[in-house]
Amino acid sequence: MVLPNAINFSDNIRKHAIIVGVLFTLDTIGTFVLFATWDRIPVPPEHSESFKNIQNVLLYTGGVSLLFTIIYWIGFLKRVRLCITVCLVFVVLSIVLQVIGLLGAMIELSIVNTIIMLIVLGINGYVWLVLVQLRRIMLNGFITDSGQV
């Protein structure tokens, strides 16, 4: 499949793969920071149970994000194609869940949530494109800076 030049990252795939790794890492760090600061939010007593449940969800989400971040970096640095495939499946599943969230935001007529979901979908679309191309290049072999495989 030949991609248009605007979305073909094969020539400088390493740079884009590092950007994807940084995005995975920032997502993990952000989730754990949110989990750590969740106790500092003043909560009315009648909502304390639901806030505790949200904190648990943040902990589990951060753990899953950390797992896939480690798998991605192992796959990229050690050139393990299976690890990249696992991350690709994770990104595809997250895109499906984000489309469902986008539909929910549109049904609620929440313009802010809709814009946030569109931005996140755009970022995950970029991650998906880079992972697909990285996986394909790993099958054929990396091209070095001197033009050799």
Image (cartoon, rainbow, N blue to C red):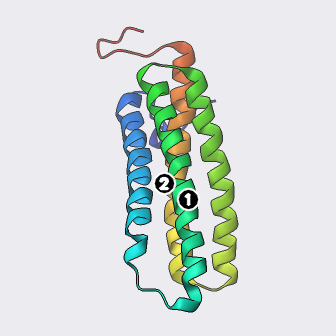
Proximity of marks 1 and 2: CB atoms separated by less than 8 Å? yes
Toward the viewer: 48 or 110? Answer: 48
Q: Residue at x 55, y 67 (%)?
A: 117
Q: Residues within 10 Å of mark 1 (few under 14, many from 20)?
A: some
Say which amino acid is labelled 1. Answer: Leu
Q: Quadrant of residue 81?
A: top right
Residue 111 placement (x, y as % from top left): 54, 82
- The disc at residue 123 is 2
Q: Secondary structure at mark 2?
A: helix
Q: Residue at x 38, y 51 (%)?
A: 26
Q: So how many labels did they put on this image?
A: 2
Check the image and report above or below for 63 versus 133: below
Check the image and report above or below for 37 versus 89: below
Q: Which residue is mark 1?
A: 121
- Quarter containing the N terminus: top right
Residue 19 placement (x, y as % from top left): 37, 41
Instruction: Single out the residue that lies furthest toward the top.
Output: 148
Toward the viewer: 52 or 32? Answer: 52
Q: Secondary structure at mark 1?
A: helix
- The disc at residue 32 is none
Instruction: Single out the residue that lies furthest toward the left.
Output: 146
Check the image and report above or below for 86 versus 43: above
Q: Residue at x 52, y 40 (%)?
A: 67
- Quarter containing the C terminus: top left
Say which amino acid is labelled 2. Answer: Ile
Toward the viewer: 31 or 123? Answer: 31
Q: CA distance from mark 1 to mark 2?
A: 5 Å
Q: Residues within 10 Å of mark 2 (few under 14, many from 20)?
A: some
Toward the viewer: 21 or 43? Answer: 43
Residue 6 placement (x, y as % from top left): 45, 43
Residue 18 placement (x, y as % from top left): 37, 36
